[in-house]
Image: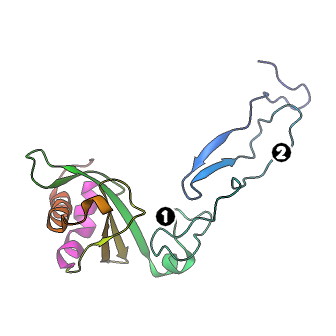
Amino acid sequence: MRTLPRLGLSPIPMHCVAITSWRSSARLNEPAVMVGAARHRVKRAAGYPRGMCRVCMKRPEIPDERYGRCEQCAKAGRNAFRFRLFPARGGAGFTVKAGELSPHALGQKWRAPLNAYKGHLTTKTNLGLHELEMVTAKERVESLRIAPDLAGHDEEVVAALHDAAERTDSAW
């Protein structure tokens, strides 16, 4: 592959990387450039709104915030952890197959707050198939949100999350 004699850069076409907070693609300002193309800063694809906070879903998120939170949720220590549920092997109930927290971290830090949680589950349409979201504030569980396809299976979903907290595995 030929390089630009002046810059010593390869003429690689524009790089596109998925940005989950913007739910689109972005152009990166990298050393690799297209021959004759102008440099671009990171910018949002046209027509996409600014990302909303994953926790409260009201305010715009902080651009470089690790968990996709708004300023108020970040100050309050609120987080949203997602888990993917699958039908259990026995056919009855569900089991956690993947999550943003490891089973060890879920058991160590969130077992007691999960046992203390007495609220009911809410259905949120922004969650994908078989997803559960645990919203936490500092050291307590604030709410549990489930995908629309899990509505009506509240006891089974909560039991799957409690079973996941009791696991001793280090990975899902």
Q: Mark 2 belongs to which amino acid?
A: Arg
Q: Residue at x 72, y 55 (%)?
A: 43
Q: Nearer the viewer, residue 40 or 149?
A: 149
First-in-chain label (1 vs 2): 2
In the rendering, at what x and y percent does residue 148 appear?
Answer: 31, 62
Mark 2 burial class by Cα count in 10 Å: few <14, some 14-19, many 20+: some
In the rendering, at what x and y percent does residue 88 appear?
Answer: 14, 49
Return the residue at label 2: 39
Query: Among all residues in the image, which is located at the extreme right?
Result: 6
Mark 1 burial class by Cα count in 10 Å: few <14, some 14-19, many 20+: some
Q: Nearer the viewer, residue 157 or 153?
A: 153
Q: Residue at x 52, y 70 (%)?
A: 53
Q: Is residue 52 above or below residue 120?
A: above
Tell me: 136 left or right of 164: right
Q: Is residue 43 magenta?
A: no
Inter-mark Cα distance, 1 to 2: 29 Å
Q: Is residue 111 magenta?
A: yes
Tell me: 14 left or right of 20: right
Q: Which residues are magenta?
A: 101-117
Helix, strand or loop status at disc 2 = loop
In the rendering, at what x and y percent does residue 70 appear?
Answer: 55, 74
In the rendering, at what x and y percent does residue 44 appear?
Answer: 69, 56
Return the residue at label 1: 67
